[in-house]
Amino acid sequence: MPNLISSVLQLKCPKCREGDLFCNKSSYQYKGFFDMPKKCTKCGQDFEIETGFYYGAMYVSYALTIAITVAVFVALSVLNLFSIGIFLITDLIALLLALPYVFRVSRSIWIALMIKYDKNAIQHKHEHQAS
């Protein structure tokens, strides 16, 4: 059974934790960056739950960007390198580098909060197709 945290971080389906949430596996490839399949290829979970469903992921994204900003602040303070200029430049670079992954993992966290894991999801899909 795949662990919840690892499946969220690996951008996997929350129901079966095996299917991919995004068509393109690379978070840093421009083409197809936003594309998600309509359904999980492994268990058939619908990823288009309702219109505007992923707007809630913006709150998750906001929290993650705040966490990154705090981490940059703490790192610069601990290393005794803090100045407002260095902080702003370092934070901007960190956020720009993290942005593609933060966008995707925010959606992964959001859908994982809403969809319950089912260890038999793939088996149920195959049984449904056989009948």
Image (spheres, helix red, strand yellow):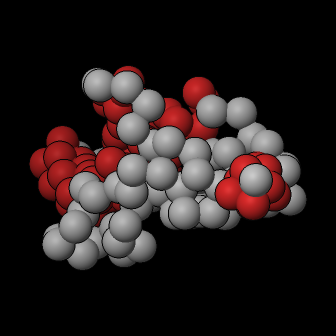
Task: Report how many numbered discs are placed on residues in the image.
Answer: 0
Among all residues in the image, which is located at the extreme front?
A: 131
Q: In which quarter of the image is the N terminus?
A: bottom right
Asked if 20 appears above or below 53 in the picture, the reply is below
Image point 29% across, 25% down: which residue? 51
The foreground one among 26 and 35 is: 35
Q: Splitting the image into 4 quarters, where does residue 99 fall?
A: bottom left
Q: Can residue 49 be seen in this view?
A: yes
**In the image, residue 33 lies at what x, y percent?**
24, 63
The foreground one among 50 and 5 is: 50
Image point 22% across, 67% down: which residue? 32
**In the image, residue 46 lies at what x, y percent?**
50, 42
**In the image, residue 22 lies at what x, y percent?**
40, 61
**In the image, residue 76 lies at what x, y percent?**
38, 52
Image point 19% across, 52% down: which residue? 92
Q: Is residue 75 visible?
A: no
Asked if 78 appears above or below 42 in the picture, the reply is above
Drawn side of residue 21 relative to residue 17, left or right: left
Drawn side of residue 112 relative to residue 28, left or right: right
Image point 63% across, 63% down: which residue? 42
Asked if 47 appears above or below 16 in the picture, the reply is above
The foreground one among 83 and 16 is: 16
